[in-house]
Amino acid sequence: MTSVLVTGCAGFIGSHLVDFLLSKGATVTGIDNFRTGKRNNLASALANPRFVLLEMDICDSSLLQRVAETYDTIFHLAAVSSVKLSVENPALVHRNNVDGTLNVLELARIRDAKRVVLSSSAAVYGNPSSLPVNEESPLNPQSPYAASKISAEEYLVAYGNSYGIEPVILRYFNVYGPRQTCSEYSGVLSIFINQALNSEPITVEGDGKQTRNFIYVDDVVRATYLASEANRARGETINISGSEAISVLQVAQAVLSAVGQTSSRIVHLPERKGDLRDSIGSMSKARRLLRFKPQVSLNDGLRRTVEWHQLESCSP
């Protein structure tokens, strides 16, 4: 790997990936429209002469004119990643996640990119009939967000079949860690931590018995990098999940313990529309093709995330 493109480079996962790629000696071009991404996330990258930032929207018709180079790999992370927002504004999510992906794939085709690694989501599985869910499980979208990710996946497969691009699809399960946006559209761990730090009620939607595999962002970045390098990953769809299943209510209790002294208490709200009951991924394919398994335990990752939130000013 010498020259790579990262879309969504200022976002939660994208900025960590940029830092990791630069540490590996790659020359990195990043694209972000800063709708949710933050410049502070790129503080280290912007000081590196091997990083170039293009502030623009992946849906912009000028993408081909602005991005004139050829890249070994395109990491496509730019997306609206909120189930809640997709239920509220499905057209916005379609434009970013489907039209935007098509625009990036056109860039890959015309600029002769060798491999495109797409960051997809466990949401595509819906509520599976058995757990852990593997990559051959039926797709059953429960939200416009999930439908948009399936569309993006299918476009990537089609471009691989039609134009010889090497597609790799990664279905992330419940990623958490430093730099995750603090808002009502964030991941549940980020929401819980900020509620606890501000001595607000921790709001569990539904009965809290929903189960999740949480995976720390550093592990996700490492898996994403491996997917760009491994020959066996070519043309594959791979789950990237944590190894510890836990209920949402248990997560809320773990956050209270990690934050320490707080007047927060757990309260229950109505179940969120489009939310999944269980999201537990099989990692057998990731172990086999990428030689990957998570290294950061939930307790350790939660501690690191709380420490970051305590030090950083985290605003929507």
Image: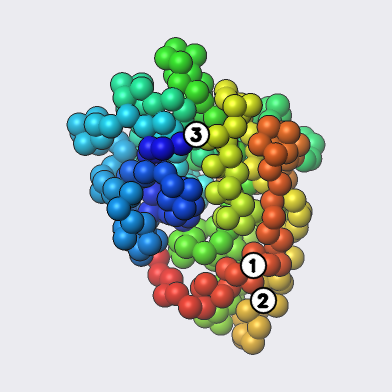
| Nearer-N-terminus badge (1/2) | 2
Q: Who's the residue at 31% across and 38% down the image? A: 58
Of discs 3 and 1, which sits in the foreground?
3
* Helix, strand or loop at mark 2: helix
Q: Who's the residue at 33% across and 50% down the image? A: 51
Which residue matches tag 3?
117
Is 43 positioned to the left or the right of 19 in the image? Answer: left
| Nearer-N-terminus badge (2/3) | 3
Q: Residue furthest top?
A: 162
Cα–Cα span, label 1 and label 2 = 7 Å
Residue 253 appears in the picture as rendered: yes
Which residue type does callout 1 highlight?
A: Leu
Which residue matches tag 1?
302
Displayed quadrant of residue 98: top left
Displayed quadrant of residue 187: bottom right
Which residue type does callout 2 highlight?
A: Ala
* Helix, strand or loop at mark 3: strand
The C terminus, quarter of image? bottom left
Q: Residue furthest right?
A: 130
**Residue situated in front as seen by the camera: 277 or 24:** 24
Q: Are marks 1 and 2 in contact (CB under 8 Å)?
A: yes
Which residue matches tag 2?
258
Cα–Cα span, label 2 and label 3 = 34 Å
* Disc 1 crowd, CA 10 A, few/some/many (<14, 14-19, 20+): many
* Disc 2 crowd, CA 10 A, few/some/many (<14, 14-19, 20+): some
